[in-house]
Image (cartoon, rainbow, N blue to C red):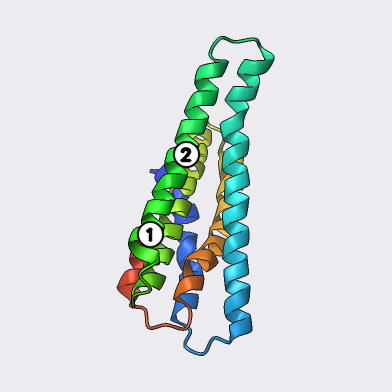
Amino acid sequence: TQTLFLGALSGLTIFLGMPLARLRAVSKGQQSFLNALAIGVLFFLFIDVMEHALEPVEHALKGGDASFALLLTMLIVGFGVGLMSLVYYGRRFLLKQSDSTHIHLAMLIAVGIGLHNFSEGLAIGNSAVHGELKLALLLIVGFGLHNITEAFGIAAPLAGRTVSWKILALAG
């Protein structure tokens, strides 16, 4: 129960930044700032994911492990499939320039951030299960603050448009 509460506390902080999407009067400068912030968060996530993805490949290479080729192939194929799914999503939903393009982009960002946050939740749970509550608390505070800024990335495409609370709740 304690671990579940602590994880929820960390994860629910993303909702603190979501009301930004409900702002009506957003200048081009503010919108550019929110978009730049979203790009920065996504770039950070990309670097973070690639760092962790390359770790087992590097370990296998340095250790002369026979699994190096398999790990490298899995990394390349997985990365390729991930990129191609983004291309498909972009062509299917984002290039149409419909009234809901901004919602589709926000949901794409939300899903990416959600997958990233899943691993953060696992780190919190792992620390708590092993009795390292100080580490779990530190992770919760860090991830909680980090999640507030991630909400800006989701809210950026929605800012200045009419967006329902239901869409914001779903994205969160």
Vertical arrangement, residue 107 with respect to residue 66, above or below: below
Question: Is 103 left, or right, of 50 in this rendering?
Answer: left
Query: Where, by quadrant of the figure, is residue 30 drawn?
Result: bottom right
Disc 1 residue type? Arg
> Of the residues under marks 2 and 1, which one precedes in the sequence?
2
Q: CA separation, marks 2 and 1?
A: 16 Å
| Frontmost residue, 50 versus 126 | 50
**Residue 158 visible in the shown view:** yes
Where does label 1 land, which residue?
91
In this view, the residue farthest toward the bottom is: 25
Q: Which residue is nearer to you in this view: 160 or 150?
A: 160
Picture coordinates of residue 69 (x, y %)?
54, 17
Residue found 58% across the figure and 49% down from its top? 45
Q: Position of residue 77 (x, y in %)?
A: 46, 32
| Quarter of the figure that contains the N terminus | top left
Pointer 1: residues within 10 angstroms few (<14), some, or many (20+)? few
Question: Which structural element holds mark 2?
Answer: helix
Residue 144 location (% of width, % of height):
55, 56
**Is 100 located above or below residue 124 in the figure?**
below
The residue positioned farthest toward the right in the image shown: 62
Label placed on residue 80 = 2
Q: Residues within 10 Å of mark 2 (few under 14, many from 20)?
A: few
Please identify the quarter of the rendering in which residue 139 is found: top right
Q: Residue at x 50, y 76 (%)?
A: 20
Residue positioned 58% across, 47% down in the render:
46
The total of numbered circles placed on residues is 2
Q: Is residue 89 above or below residue 131?
A: below
Q: Residue at x 58, y 72 (%)?
A: 34
Quarter of the image with the C terminus in it:
bottom left
Q: Secondary structure at mark 1?
A: helix
What is the three-letter code of the residue carrying label 2? Answer: Gly
